[in-house]
Amino acid sequence: MKSVLLYVNDDTGLEVRLQAALDVTRAVGGHLHCLRPNPYNPQMAFDGVTGMSVVYDVAKMTLEADRKLRASIESRLADEDVPWDYDEVNASPARGLARNSALSDIMVLSSASGDKDNALPLGILGDVLFNTNVPALVQPDGIKKFDATGTAVVAWNGSFEAGNALRAAVPMLHLASAVHILTVDEDKDHDLPPLAASEYLSRHGITSEIHSMSAKKPSVEAVLLSTVEALHASYMVMGAYGHSRAREFLFGGVTRSLFKDCPVPLIVSH
């Protein structure tokens, strides 16, 4: 894990994303790639009568705002101790991130918690995750750092997606002070038991502890969140589901709840 992709947008969540991306880049000794997707089409639209552009003023303001944003980010990064670059693409956030992530090892996004204007909407988060093979660090608005050396929790249900997330997170889990694999007994359809996940990590030199929890609380996500709190976890690793009902799951299930309510960063993979 060496190439870190940061979603750049002029919102109040940017500073949190930037700091998390810097923390990850330092932890892995990597390179930070800042990407500003701009959905505005630079081509002029004419009204057919006067021949004057009806979007000129909007385009001008957008370009000026992007210049200021870039200058601000570049000024900030000039004082940091990581290698970096900055790029702009004419695309929506989801399309821009998906099309420019092929050579990235992890991307840094905001969660759907806090101020709604800070984050990619849940649907766009789904578009990004389901159209790339790149794991995402989903950073809550209220967490101003990413502690790679803290305690990690792996939410395990034995699925293909959980396996993808676990494999993608191995470089981070190597740095963790402790790794806990958490299963909830409500999930009966394990394709792979948690012991298999623990054995996989052991082959990478990572020691882990398995916790099999009872779903006595109101929901699976409540069990996950209470365990994260009890273990003082710094982040959680989990899979995002990409079958034909993926969007329904995102908008109605555990993934949606954790994207909105998880108090720690999530490392998520499809």
Image (tube, rainbow, N blue to C red):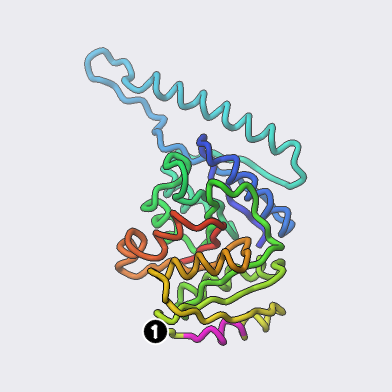
Q: Position of residue 3 (x, y in %)?
A: 64, 56
The residue at which mark 1 appears reads as 189
State the residue at coordinates (59%, 49%). Answer: 143
Q: Per the image, is 99 magenta?
A: no
Q: Position of residue 211 (x, y in %)?
A: 56, 80
Which residue extends farthest top?
A: 50
Q: How many marks?
A: 1
State the residue at coordinates (63%, 35%). Answer: 73
State the residue at coordinates (69%, 32%). Answer: 75
In front here: 189 or 263?
263
The answer to which image quadrant residue 217 occupies is bottom left
56 displayed left or right of 47: right
Q: Secondary structure at mark 1?
A: loop
**Residues packed near mark 1 inside 10 Å, few (<14), some (14 to 19) or many (20 plus):** few
Quadrant the N terminus occupies: bottom right
Residue 234 in the image: above or below residue 36: below
In front here: 261 or 70?
261
Q: Three-letter amino acid code at disc 1?
A: Asp
Q: Position of residue 78 (x, y in %)?
A: 73, 36
User: Which SS does the magenta portion mostly show?
Assistant: helix
The magenta stretch is: 192-198
Residue 66 in the image: above or below residue 26: above
Which residue extends farthest left?
A: 49
In front here: 51 or 247?
247
